[in-house]
Image (cartoon, rainbow, N blue to C red):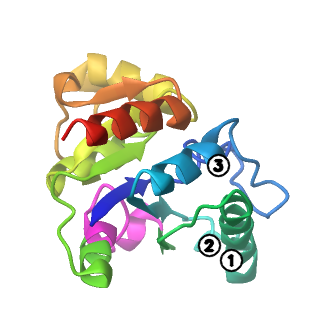
Amino acid sequence: MKLIILDRDGVINYDREDFVKSADECVPIDGSIDAIVRLNKAGFTVVIATNQSGLAKDKFDLEDLEAMHEKITRLVEEQGGEIGAIFYCPHRDEDNCKCRKPKPGMLDAIEAEFNTSVESCYFIGDSLRDLQAAVQKACKPVLVRTGNGVRTLAQLAVPGLQTGFPAIDAEQVQVFDNLSAAADFIIVAGQQQ
């Protein structure tokens, strides 16, 4: 199984300072839906792993979150693709759960769900915590410049700006402008294997 893991906000859809709180506010980044479809057609199972602390902070409820995920799933399906699964962490940092990235709990859950290892899978995110979760499980970390990506790039350039664990070496991270560009690279790399 060729698995690829995507963060949601800032990778698939535009992020918001005040949280993405509804399906209406869940607006796909140009080219992201098509990128997921192209990854599917190249044989990848696309899985989303997203921190959604807005649930714990009462910014939106479970029904709102499900509506956002139904919208993304429907947009992908309308173009002939599919989302393999969506995993989310509903907790805040202070809840000290095992699933909130950068902790690897969601990746453990993905391994259990698909009965496979995520080792060497691509993990595409826009934040340091995405990259940290990826590295802890030996995924291939990919950073997009959309969402928080530019700020994360600055954190990688100056290790003293990094928070959390583990520290990320900028040289181990592949960087692309957006999900579409990352998908182009991954599809070509997959064909060369």
The quarter in which the C terminus is drawn is top left
Of the two numbered discs 3 and 1 in the rendering, the one whose residue sits closer to the viewer: 3
Disc 1 marks a residue whose amino acid type is: Glu
Judge whether 186 appears above or below 171 on screen: below
Residue where numbered disc 1 is placed: 66
Give me the C-alpha separation between circle 3 and circle 1. Answer: 18 Å
Asked if residue 148 shows in the view, the reply is yes
The quarter in which the N terminus is drawn is bottom left
Of the two numbered discs 2 and 1 in the rendering, the one whose residue sits closer to the viewer: 1
Left or right for 60, reference 12:
right
Q: How crowded is mark 3: few (under 14 residues within 10 Å), some or many (20 or more)?
A: many
| Residue under the image location 64 percent in, 49 percent down | 33
| Residue under the image location 17 percent in, 51 percent down | 120
State the SS at label 2.
loop
Residue where numbered disc 3 is placed: 33
Left or right for 163, reference 94:
left
Q: Is residue 101 magenta?
A: yes
Judge whether 105 appears above or below 9 on screen: below
Q: Is residue 16 magenta?
A: no
Residue where numbered disc 2 is placed: 55
> Which numbered tag is attached to residue 154?
none
Question: Magenta segment range?
Answer: 92-107
Q: x%, y% of residue 169?
A: 16, 28
Which quadrant of the structure image shows residue 170?
Answer: top left
Q: Mark 2–mark 3 contact, CB under 8 Å? A: no
- Count of numbered circles in the view: 3
Left or right for 46, reference 188:
right
Disc 2 marks a residue whose amino acid type is: Leu
Disc 3 marks a residue whose amino acid type is: Ile
